[in-house]
Amino acid sequence: MAKKFKLTVGGIDYVIMSDSDEAYVHKMGDELNRALDSLSHAHPYLSTTMVAVLTALEYLDESYRLKDEAENLRIQMKNYVEDAACARLETEEARREIDRLNRENRILRDGAGHR
């Protein structure tokens, strides 16, 4: 069930509804405030709205990059799993061939010993 939290971001109070715990919501608010303050201090001529939009764009860029990275890792993992499955099949096939050759070798040795 969603809980309400008061969060101050950029000097403005917001009521946030979230299923997350309060510490997590405040941690996000603190990080956002640090990012806003950092950009605002680095570029004091920017309006509050411009600082907010640029900060949002930075977070979106990071989010998209991380999503792409996660997708690439999923694809790599899928390929590794497929490669491992193929290797297991090849190993099992090689074991069966070794067993077959060992049986054939025993038969040939046993037959040569009876001559």
Image: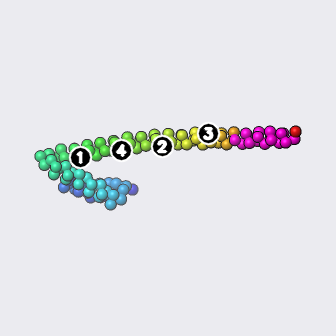
Q: Residue 79 placed where, x, y %? A: 50, 39
Which sits earlier in the primary sequence, circle 1 or circle 3?
1
Which sits earlier in the primary sequence, circle 3 or circle 2?
2
Q: Is residue 12 magenta?
A: no
Q: Which residues are magenta?
A: 98-114
Q: Residue furthest bottom?
A: 23
Please report contact status of discs 4 and 1: CB closer than 8 Å, yes or no.
no
Q: Residue at x 36, y 56 (%)?
A: 20
Which sits earlier in the primary sequence, circle 2 or circle 1?
1
Q: Is residue 60 above or below residue 7?
A: above
Q: Residue 109 placed where, x, y %? A: 80, 41
Q: Label 1 belongs to which residue? A: 55
Q: Secondary structure at mark 3?
A: helix
Which sits earlier in the primary sequence, circle 4 or circle 1?
1
Three-letter code for the amino acid on which mark 3 is drawn = Glu
* C-alpha span from label 4 to label 3: 36 Å
Residue 94 visible in the displayed image: yes
Disc ID at residue 90 = 3
Q: Label 4 belongs to which residue? A: 66
Which sits earlier in the primary sequence, circle 4 or circle 3?
4
Disc ID at residue 77 = 2
Query: Residue 97 falls in which quadrant of the image?
Result: top right
Query: Of circles 2 and 1, which is in front?
Result: 2
Query: Of circles 2 and 4, which is in front?
Result: 2
Left or right: residue 75 versus residue 105 is left
Q: Residue at x 27, y 54 (%)?
A: 31
* C-alpha span from label 3 to label 2: 20 Å
Q: Taken as a whole, is the magenta stretch helix, strand or loop?
A: helix
Q: Secondary structure at mark 1?
A: helix
Three-letter code for the amino acid on which mark 1 is drawn = Thr
